[in-house]
Amino acid sequence: MLIEAVTGRSWAREVDARITGPLGLRRTRTGFLRDLPAPHATNYMQFTRGGPLVDTTIAIRGLDSGADGSMTSTASDLNRFLAALAGGRLLRPAQQAQMRTLVATADSPAGSGYGLAIFWIPLSCGGGYWRHGGTGLGYQAEPAFTDDGRRLTVSPASRV
């Protein structure tokens, strides 16, 4: 709603114009899709203990219809996005610095913190990584990248 109020355009249009288009994210879609392009992960939920797994891939998509849950992508497109974000190709230097300015949280390990939409997790061997995962009914994604963006991973997984 904020993006639309500021720009006069939908969040999906702004994401397409500012991120997916310029980065060439050809398998990333914004907005609600009735059918997902193949191949795609299948989401399952178990509604009763010991009950059957129910395919909720499309059935619950309407619940995630806003900017927080209605994008679909591939691991390779998400890796390209993360590399651009970490490498400073999406934000101006001042915005990049703000994104990485940490605020400690009470339940986080020592040395970790929350920036603007990303978490910093220190490693016991030195250094650390940035992450921002997402979950929904029947799925979970856990992307992470090093400070310089040279190493990154996306772990998409269905869950019960």
Image: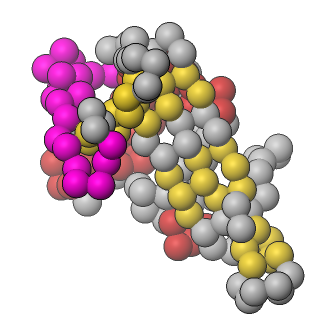
Note whether 34 is above or below 102 in the view shown.
below
Q: Which residue sits furthest right?
A: 52
Any part of residue 93 in sight: yes
Task: Give the main secondary structure of the magenta stretch.
Answer: loop
- Percent x, y for residue 70? 52, 57
Note whether 41 is above or below 93 in the view shown.
below
| Residue at image location 66% in from the left, 65% down from the top | 138
Figure label count: 0
Q: Is residue 50 left or right of residue 101?
A: right
| Residue at image location 54% in from the left, 15% down from the top | 151
| Residue at image location 17% in from the left, 41% down from the top | 103
Task: Determine if the magenta segment contains residue 149.
Answer: no
Query: Which of the 4 image quarters holds residue 58?
Result: bottom right
Query: Which of the 4 image quarters holds residue 140?
Result: bottom right
Note whether 78 is above or below 126 in the view shown.
below
Any part of residue 35 in sight: no
- Percent x, y for residue 52? 86, 82
Q: Is residue 60 left or right of residue 135?
A: right
- Residue placed most toward the observer, 126 or 4: 126
| Residue at image location 42% in from the left, 47% down from the top | 12
- Percent x, y for residue 159? 70, 61
Q: Is residue 105 left or right of residue 135?
A: left
Range of magenta residues: 90-109
- Percent x, y for residue 39? 82, 44
- Residue placed most toward the observer, 107 or 60: 107
- Residue placed most toward the observer, 109 or 98: 109
Task: Determine if the magenta segment contains residue 106.
Answer: yes
The quarter of the picture where the C terminus appears is bottom right
The quarter of the picture where the N terminus appears is bottom left
